[in-house]
């Protein structure tokens, strides 16, 4: 399988292909170390799924990232600007801001510090976010959680409002567990976790979201994403400048988006009409436990996010 996937990457010199398999399925990670790190990865229940993912999205993503990084410069200074996030970047943003905060143990630990509670608005526009592990065929799919409870779909955000939490037996909601208790292999504690997180589509074509930006940025696939309590950090592979509604050849790397989760989500002002599913190679880490989570989202447009040179502070 490694030889077959490497052959598919033959048109992209310098790529290193790593294939892994375990009891949960197969995974591939393709990396290129040059002027900057370029990588793409995926997970699948079977080997054929890796090949399909590489052909359908991986090769295009790698070409795009390579072209961007080769012509890029480090972001010179902090800037506040409208930002269009590509689907995986958008999914990671919602995963960190909404998904983790909607895990019942996290909600109990720091929800009171967010300034919003269940029933309040995350966004001023009609965002919908659902976690549904029962969707089959994805790296985050499962029928029963690690406490033996049947998984059920949970609507986390409905029409922009916070509408649900992910619960387990150890961290139940008013109705008990909704089947989101997960444990990494070899770990002791079962924690409320996401499975297949989906951001619902909106009304706008990606092209129209970009065209609405006079001076801003298009953010590429994430190289890092994480959160600590109410704060989030997102590091894109690249940021292309948008001027007068057009993506230009002006490209920046070595930058991060940092800020308060609620303040970031409140700046959402446009949702794309086509969602893209990803089964990422990198697993989601929480309290030292890594589990696979699938992510689905469209392009998202935000007003005036703060972009910092990597290493800067808010």
Image (spheres, rainbow, N blue to C red):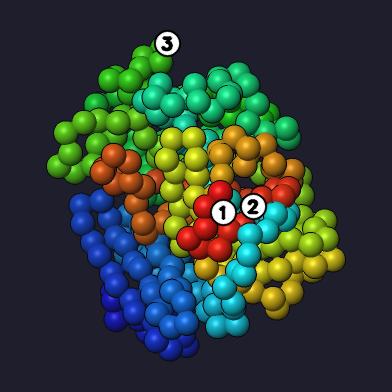
Q: Position of 210 compared to 179: left or right?
A: right
Q: Residue 193 or 149: which is nearer the viewer?
A: 193
Q: How far apart are marks 1 and 2 (CA)?
A: 6 Å
Q: Describe the element under mark 1 as helix, strand or loop.
A: strand
Choose the circle earlier in sequence order: 3 or 1. 3
Residue at position x 37%, y 42% in the image: 141
Q: How far apart are marks 3 and 1 (CA)?
A: 35 Å
**Is disc 1 surrounded by few (<14), some (14 to 19) or many (20+) residues within 10 Å?**
many
Q: Residue 280 or 255: which is nearer the viewer?
A: 255
| Residue located beneath label 3 in the image | 174
Vertical order, 204 against 34 (above or below): above
Q: How many labels does the image show?
A: 3
Choose the circle earlier in sequence order: 2 or 3. 3
**Residue 131, horizontal then vertical, whole percent:** 48, 35
| Residue located beneath label 1 in the image | 257
Residue 306 is marked as 2
Q: How far apart are marks 2 and 3 (CA)?
A: 38 Å
**Residue 119, horizontal then vertical, whole percent:** 60, 18
Residue at position x 19%, y 43% in the image: 185
Choose the circle earlier in sequence order: 1 or 2. 1
**Residue 284, horizontal then vertical, whole percent:** 36, 47
> Tags 1 and 2 in contact by the CB under 8 Å rule?
yes
**Residue 41, horizontal then vertical, whole percent:** 40, 65
Vertical order, 114 against 18 (above or below): above
Residue at position x 55%, y 38% in the image: 261
**Rendering quarter of residue 79:** bottom right
Taking the image as drawn, is residue 306 in sight? Answer: yes
**Is disc 3 surrounded by few (<14), some (14 to 19) or many (20+) residues within 10 Å?**
few
Q: Which corner quadrant holds the N terminus?
A: bottom left
Frontmost of labels 2 and 3 is: 2
**Rendering quarter of residue 207:** bottom right
Residue at position x 55%, y 83% in the image: 70
């Amino acid at each position: 399988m490694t030889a077959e996937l490497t052959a598919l990457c033959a048109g992209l010199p310098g790529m290193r292909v790593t294939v892994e398999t375990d009891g949960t399925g197969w995974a591939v990670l393709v990396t290129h170390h040059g002027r900057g790190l370029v990588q793409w990865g995926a997970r699948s229940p079977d080997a054929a799924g890796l090949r399909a993912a590489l052909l359908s999205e991986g090769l295009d993503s790698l070409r795009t990232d390579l072209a961007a990084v080769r012509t890029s410069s480090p972001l010179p200074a902090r800037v506040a600007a409208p930002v269009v996030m590509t689907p995986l970047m958008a999914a990671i943003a919602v995963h960190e801001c909404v998904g983790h905060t909607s895990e019942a143990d996290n909600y109990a630990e720091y929800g009171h510090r967010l300034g919003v509670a269940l029933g309040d608005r995350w966004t001023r526009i009609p965002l919908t976010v659902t976690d549904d592990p029962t969707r089959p065929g994805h790296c985050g799919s499962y029928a029963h959680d690690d406490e033996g409870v049947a998984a059920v779909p949970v609507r986390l955000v409905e029409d922009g409002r916070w509408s649900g939490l992910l619960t387990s037996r150890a961290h139940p909601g008013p109705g008990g567990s909704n089947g989101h208790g997960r444990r990494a292999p070899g770990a002791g504690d079962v924690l409320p976790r996401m499975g297949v997180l989906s951001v619902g589509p909106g009304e706008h074509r990606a092209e129209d979201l970009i065209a609405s930006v006079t001076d801003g940025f298009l953010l590429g696939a994430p190289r890092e994403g994480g959160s600590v309590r109410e704060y989030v950090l997102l590091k894109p592979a690249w940021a292309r400048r948008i001027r007068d509604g057009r993506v230009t050849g002006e490209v920046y790397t070595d930058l991060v988006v940092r800020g308060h989760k609620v303040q970031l989500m409140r700046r959402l002002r446009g949702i794309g009409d086509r969602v893209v599913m990803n089964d990422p190679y990198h697993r989601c880490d929480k309290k030292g436990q890594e589990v696979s989570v699938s992510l689905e989202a469209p392009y998202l447009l935000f007003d005036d996010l703060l972009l910092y040179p990597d290493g800067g502070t808010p």
